[in-house]
Image: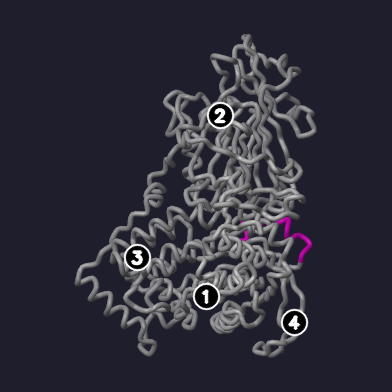
Amino acid sequence: MCGIALIVSGIRFHISSFISDSPRKSHKLLFTLDDLKASLRRRGPDSLGVKKVLLHHNVSAKNPITSVVEDDDDEVHELQSMMLCSGNTDNSGQCDNFSVGKPAAAELRFIGATLQLRGINPQVQPLVDSSGNVLVYNGEIFGGHNLASDCNDSEFLMQALGKCCSCGSCLTGECVQCGKSSIADVLSTIKGPWAIIYWQGSSNTLWFGRDAFGRRSLLVHWPTEDDPTFLLSSVSPVSPSQQESEYEAPNGMGCLSYWEELPCGIYHVYVNASNTNGHLVGEIKKYEFTNSMLNELIKWERTSIEPNSEDLQISRHEFSRRHDMHSPSLEAVPCELGSTQPAILTPAHILLNALKESVLRRTSLYTIYQAMISGIKQESFVPVAVLFSGGLDSMILAALLDQCLDPIYEIDLLNVSFDGQFAPDRISAKAGLKELKRVAPCRRWRLVEIDANLSDLVLETSHVMSLINPANTFMDLNIGIALWLASGGEGCLPVANGDENDDNHARIRYKSTARILLVGSGADEQCAGYGRHRTSYRRGSWLGLHEEMRLDMQRIWKRNLGRDDRCIADNGKEARFPFLDEDVIRVLLNIPLWEVANLDQPSGIGDKVILREVAKMLGLFEAAVLPKRAIQFGSRIARESNRKNFGSNRAANQASAGSVGIYKK
């Protein structure tokens, strides 16, 4: 994982092709380059690098735009004893360095901070190759491309992109002139989360984008008349002076409007010289993903939405059979990885297999940077943790992680509470731990109890406000604080042999060092876990439910994932989302909607019914009947926030506190 950023100056961008022509007001840049580096370094504590691409305009040259890659100290970067020279050749084909001595017409500054999780050799981003290409990449390649077990994602991608077409005759598909693949094809083939910024030196072209579901954050500041700078960044930095003051956001706007979540997709900018005034110009264009199977997932069209009477009769019969806890059935036996399965798989079995593969892809030890465990005793190394409420989704992830991870490793279960031992999520986490110990007695589980008092988190709250930016509601802030504290992993462990039911039981301080966190995002959106899904079903039956679920999936990048990634990654941890694996999404879309949810049944039974069946297959019978509870309510931060900002829960409810923007007092 990385924190990545790009600052572009000296290029006049045309963005009208996909941005409204209405006047766009922006606030002044309220942070420095050092602020940006510091915020990125929190995401990538292993290394920090900066490269500059200087663009020179030489009208008399064969190619009027020349580019040179330099280190941040303004010394020209050399690789293999040669000047990185792209596009700047004279008529004889020799590198024309005449323009290097002139002031650059434009500058692209690439910043990369790395949290290395794959490969055997240390990598420092930005990566630069001998052709003058520059890459900063924040992502994981879990499929689509064949990586060796000791290969680093960024290193592999740099090589793959370097082989792509640069003649400019094609932007998608295979080039008819050179026969090479396009950059859009390479990116569209990746399975896994990613955000990328890439400079193709030979064509003077900038590429950037996010994966189809927005699982990695990438913010953008579009150029405006009063601020022509173009910026991309994983996170919004805040200067110390801002952190000491309060945010002002009248009508939900204010300084937070400087950044926007970059919509998912692949973007392309060809930099050229204007025919009228000689300025460097670039038109930003957005391209669709070229992978047809991926585009089907983006459209989120389900195979079967509305059941007929026969489908409903069969479904009711199966529902009754599966929920008869006393009848012998496959669901009553914990399902082990690699165990014998029935010849005819039920939809729940198919989903369970897909989820196992998803967790396995995200937790295999070859994906963990091996240098991190050199010199560390294996028994004390914790590679993976679970963001843990003890609810249905996190219990399934924990049980599957146990089946996928070598038993020599402990598993940290990170649980946050703003009401000590009395928060609903703390109570369910303790109950969940007991159930996990029952189904996986050989595993060493550690429930990390992270307690917080909202009134004590003044500086922390201000910091999280910068992380959730551009989101700016109290609901976003509450979720952000809970995620930030939980992913930090700093809390307490109950002393062995202590009474876990005793609210004053002895505990010892502990900080989880796991760099990979499994998070249950995407389960509610795909399996009808929200209350609004039940409302949509009552109003519009099955089609209304499907439309609401599709809306949730198509806006999850903007409402959830960017914010969550920034809050978790700020602690030097990488969030991984097994429920948002491409294969898992495809499996769920191929299952009839009435097999995924049965909203005629009460909460805790009919919602996410297919996941409840999966839980039973794993032996998690108590977790299988737990109702949905969002982190802001389960941790009780919403209650404390309502009291602090509105005076009481009742006043907050009357004001619809969750959607209220954050105002200056």
Label 4 Cα neighbours within 10 Å, binned few <14 / some 14-19 / many ≥20:
some
Mark 2: amino acid:
Phe
Kindly identify which residue carries mark 4.
507
Q: Nearer the viewer, mark 4 or mark 2?
A: 2
Position of 52 with respect to 400 (left or right) is right
In this picture, which residue range is highlighted in magenta? 364-376
x and y percentages locating residue 3 in the rendered image: 66, 48
- What separation in Å lies between label 3 and label 2 (alpha carbons)? 42 Å
Mark 1 or mark 4: whose residue is earlier in sequence: 1
Mark 3: amino acid:
Ser
Label 1 Cα neighbours within 10 Å, binned few <14 / some 14-19 / many ≥20:
many
Kindly identify which residue carries mark 1.
391
Kindly identify which residue carries mark 2.
13
- What separation in Å lies between label 3 and label 4 (alpha carbons)? 45 Å
Q: Classify residue 508 by image quadrant.
A: bottom right
Kindly identify which residue carries mark 3.
536
Residue 367 belongs to magenta span: yes
Give the SS element for disc 2.
strand
Q: Residue at x 35, y 86 (%)?
A: 324
